[in-house]
Image (cartoon, coloured by chain):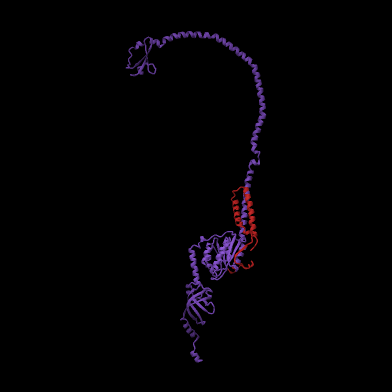
């Protein structure tokens, strides 16, 4: 016992020995993650790495600060490339692999390639919002490109049937997994578009990252972008977005959601029909009632309500005139006729007497005038003879014949003062037998023969 | 998957809806002779009936261009996408 005891180590010492040996070994390992324990509050992330054939597994830990630095999202099934060293947890006697670096292996490269492809296609403008085509509102034909097996195709058909049975569905059932899947999918897109689909659903049920790889194919992406009709994707249930999703005109999260996106709800169509029926009825009844209002407004006009009113004034004037005509005309005519008759009678009676008197007086007057005429004229004749003799002596001609002359200015006025003429004036001097045209030489105020002239 | 003739695929459903919208807008504009509007209204009501008939009797028509569809599950089977989502 003692020997045994002397040669023996305590558990702790043994483990310390092992620990010393183990921790000198630093290695790089590629394996698949099988269990993950990443809980808040833990100092480290714990997971198990195993080989594909599952014949070996290794518990791993990675201190939280390192894990966060690595920025790798480890999930069950992920293949990772780790470096680190073995360590021993003495309390449990358990060996761990202490991971210092971690990277996704294989798939990681693929993801990077996909990201690069996405960048490239984006740069080419395949993902621009302006490149996205609008979906037809009431598609007559809807294309469906997916696997003919599995739930996705029926999810879509059921959704379309429930929501929008008006559309015909053109199905291209093609393989969606495997190397040739992208080419089949592209052919399916062409087929349904050529058959008249106005919008195409490109869908696939859920699957692993690898399962969804065909939807990250560059040729398929270009095919989607160049298809003449809009494409709606509903690929898997992954939060990961495939390249197909990015270049599609609309990305839905699931096949059912994609079907919902292209198919208007039957109840929405019904509501649209009901709404239009309501609007149409309302509009027409408004038109009718407005016409009615106009009509009744017209009907309320006085001349429609009482057409005779239009004629009332004229009728009144007519009545008035007729009354006056009836009353006044026959009476006045008769009166006038009577008056005329009586006037004529009076005239006839009076006229001979009147004329007789006048004729008599006219004859008397004529006789008297004839008698008076000579008696009246004689004294005038005598007086006229006397006056003619007087006039003879008064005539200037008589004076001129005695040697006197009269001077006239050019305007014919008698010149009786020296003030009437100026030197140089021409004057006419009238003598008994003619006219002497003279020019004034001089004017003097003294009149030597004044007394004589008088 | 109805094999019978489907009025829903009649190319006039969408056009009918658009025509009906035009009619409704014309009537709503109100600048129309009464006789004309009554004619249009009658036309709209008839079109509405046709469209309603189409909607009521529509049965989805499925045409398989490529591949072979497996037996359709019953409609009451739960939607797989919803169950997984």
Query: Could you say which is closer to the camera, residue B18 or residue A341?
Result: B18
Residue A274 in the image: state x and y as whole percent.
Answer: 62, 56
Q: Is residue A321 above or below residue A109?
A: above
Q: Is residue B34 above or below residue A311?
A: below
Q: Colour of chain B?
A: red
Quarter of the rendering occupied by the C terminus of chain A = top left
| Residue drawn at x 49%, y 85% as measured from the top left | A14
Count of number-bearing discs: 0
Q: Is residue A418 left or right of residue A173?
A: left
Residue B41 can be seen, yes or no: yes
| Residue drawn at x 67%, y 26% as measured from the top left | A331
Query: Could you say which is closer to the camera, residue A330 or residue A261?
Result: A261
Query: Could you say which is closer to the camera, residue B45 or residue A196?
Result: A196
Residue A8 in the image: state x and y as whole percent.
Answer: 49, 88
Q: Which chain is purple?
A: A
Residue A281 can be seen, yes or no: no
Q: Is residue A61 left or right of residue A359?
A: left
Q: Is residue B42 above or below residue A267?
A: above
Q: Quadrant of residue A272?
A: bottom right
| Residue drawn at x 50%, y 90% as measured from the top left | A5
Residue A198 in the image: state x and y as whole percent.
Answer: 57, 60
Query: Could you say which is closer to the camera, residue A77 or residue A360?
Result: A77
Residue A328 in the image: state x and y as whole percent.
Answer: 66, 28
């Amino acid at each position: 016992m003692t020997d045994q005891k002397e040669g023996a180590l305590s558990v702790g010492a043994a483990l310390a020995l092992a620990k010393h040996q183990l921790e000198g070994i630093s290695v790089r390992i590629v394996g698949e993650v099988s269990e993950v324990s990443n809980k808040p509050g833990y100092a480290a992330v714990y997971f198990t790495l195993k080989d594909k054939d599952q014949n070996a597994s290794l518990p791993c830990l990675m201190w939280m600060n390192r894990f966060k630095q690595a920025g790798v999202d480890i999930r069950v099934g992920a293949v990772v490339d780790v470096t680190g060293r073995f360590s021993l947890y003495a309390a449990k006697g358990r060996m761990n692999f202490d991971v210092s670096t971690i990277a996704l292996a294989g798939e990681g490269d693929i993801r990077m390639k996909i990201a690069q492809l996405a960048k490239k296609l984006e740069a080419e403008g395949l993902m621009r919002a302006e490149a996205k085509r609008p979906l037809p509102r009431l598609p007559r034909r809807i294309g469906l490109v997916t696997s003919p097996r599995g739930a996705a195709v029926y999810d879509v058909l059921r959704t379309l049937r429930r929501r929008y049975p008006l559309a015909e569905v053109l199905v291209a059932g093609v393989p969606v997994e495997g190397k040739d899947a992208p080419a089949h999918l592209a052919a399916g897109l062409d087929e349904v578009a050529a058959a008249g689909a106005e919008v195409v659903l490109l869908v696939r049920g859920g699957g692993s990252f690898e399962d969804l790889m065909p939807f990250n194919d560059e040729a398929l992406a270009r095919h989607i972008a160049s298809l003449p009709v809009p494409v709606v994707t509903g690929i898997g249930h992954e939060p990961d977005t495939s390249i197909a999703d990015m270049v599609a005109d609309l990305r839905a999260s699931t096949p059912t959601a994609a079907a919902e996106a292209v198919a208007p709800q039957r109840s929405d169509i019904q509501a649209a029909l009901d709404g239009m029926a309501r609007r149409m009825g309302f509009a027409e009844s408004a038109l009718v009632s407005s016409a009615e209002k106009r009509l009744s407004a017209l009907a309320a006009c006085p001349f429609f309500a009482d057409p005779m009113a239009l004629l009332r004034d004229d009728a009144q004037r007519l009545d008035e005139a007729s009354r006056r005509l009836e009353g006044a005309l026959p009476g006045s005519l008769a009166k006038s006729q009577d008056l005329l008759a009586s006037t004529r009678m009076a005239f006839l009676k009076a006229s001979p007497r009147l004329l007789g008197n006048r004729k008599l007086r006219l004859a008397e007057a004529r006789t008297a005038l004839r008698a008076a005429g000579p008696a009246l004229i004689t004294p005038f004749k005598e007086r006229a003879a006397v006056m003619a003799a007087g006039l003879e002596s008064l005539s200037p001609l008589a004076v001129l014949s005695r040697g006197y002359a009269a001077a006239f200015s050019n305007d014919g006025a008698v010149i009786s003062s020296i003030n009437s003429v100026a030197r140089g004036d021409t004057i006419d001097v009238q003598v008994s037998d003619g006219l002497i045209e003279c020019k004034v030489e001089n004017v003097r105020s003294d009149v030597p023969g004044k007394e004589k002239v008088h | 998957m109805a094999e019978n003739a489907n009025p829903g695929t009649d190319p006039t459903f969408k056009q009918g809806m658009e025509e009906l919208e035009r009619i409704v807008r014309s009537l709503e504009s109100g600048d129309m002779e009464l006789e004309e509007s009554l004619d249009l209204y009658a036309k709209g009501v008839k079109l509405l009936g046709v469209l309603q008939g189409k909607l009521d009797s529509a049965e989805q028509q499925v045409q398989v261009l490529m591949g072979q569809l497996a037996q359709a599950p019953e409609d009451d089977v739960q939607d797989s996408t919803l169950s997984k989502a």
